[in-house]
Amino acid sequence: MIELVLADACIACDKCVLACPTNVFDQGTDGIPVIARQSDCQTCFMCEAYCPTDALYVSPDSAPADESFSPPEHLVGSYRERLGWGKGRRPGSLVAVGPEIPHGDPPPRVR
């Protein structure tokens, strides 16, 4: 289940928003995605996989962690690395690691 969006690492690219098949995120007022519908998360890891800056953490558990939860730093964004896409880029770098989200219409919004 999606647990964390690291605002300091996020570059507001909305790739997680576009990759999420269940519309878990809303765009925050500052452009940083907000976990708006955590219970809709299917733990598919797509948001974490497509995040170019490793700013997300999806827990393999299907229940939300308590509010004091803080994942170990080595786990944040680690799904990309396990896929073989390497670590993501950092803000300010020119090249993202891993595939781009396919172009076309975004998935329909679930309301």
Image (spheres, rainbow, N blue to C red):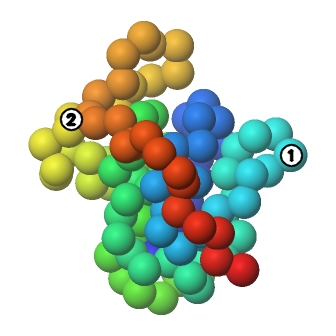
Earlier residue among tags 2 and 1: 1
Q: In the shown orientation, is residue 61 left or right of residue 92? A: left
In this rendering, the answer to whether 99 lies above or below 56 is: above
Dot 1: what SS? loop
Q: Are marks 2 and 1 in contact (CB under 8 Å)?
A: no
Q: In the shown orientation, is residue 30 left or right of residue 42? A: right
Residue found at the very far front of the displayed protein: 104
Q: In the shown orientation, is residue 90 left or right of residue 11? A: left
Amino acid residing under circle 2: Gly
Q: In the shown orientation, is residue 36 left or right of residue 2? A: right
Residue found at the very far right of the displayed protein: 29
Residue 57 visible in the picture: no
Residue sitting nearer the eye, 73 or 51? 51
Give residue 58's position: percent from left, percent from top. Answer: 42, 65
- Say which residue appears at 39% left-offset and 75% top-offset: 43
Give residue 81's position: percent from left, percent from top. Answer: 21, 44
Quadrant including the C terminus: bottom right
Dot 1: few (<14), some (14–19), or many (≥20) neighbours within 10 Å?
A: few
Compute the Cα span from label 2 to label 1.
30 Å
Task: Specify the quadrant of the image occupied by residue 1.
Answer: bottom left
Residue sitting nearer the eye, 19 or 39? 19
Residue 109 visible in the picture: yes
- Say which residue appears at 70% left-offset and 44% top-offset: 32
- Say which residue appears at 64% left-offset and 69% top-offset: 109
Picture mark count: 2
Give residue 110's position: percent from left, percent from top. Answer: 64, 77
Amino acid residing under circle 1: Thr
Dot 2: few (<14), some (14–19), or many (≥20) neighbours within 10 Å?
A: some
Residue topped by disc 1: 29
Which label number is shown at residue 86? 2
Dot 2: what SS? loop
- Say which residue appears at 59% left-offset and 35% top-offset: 13
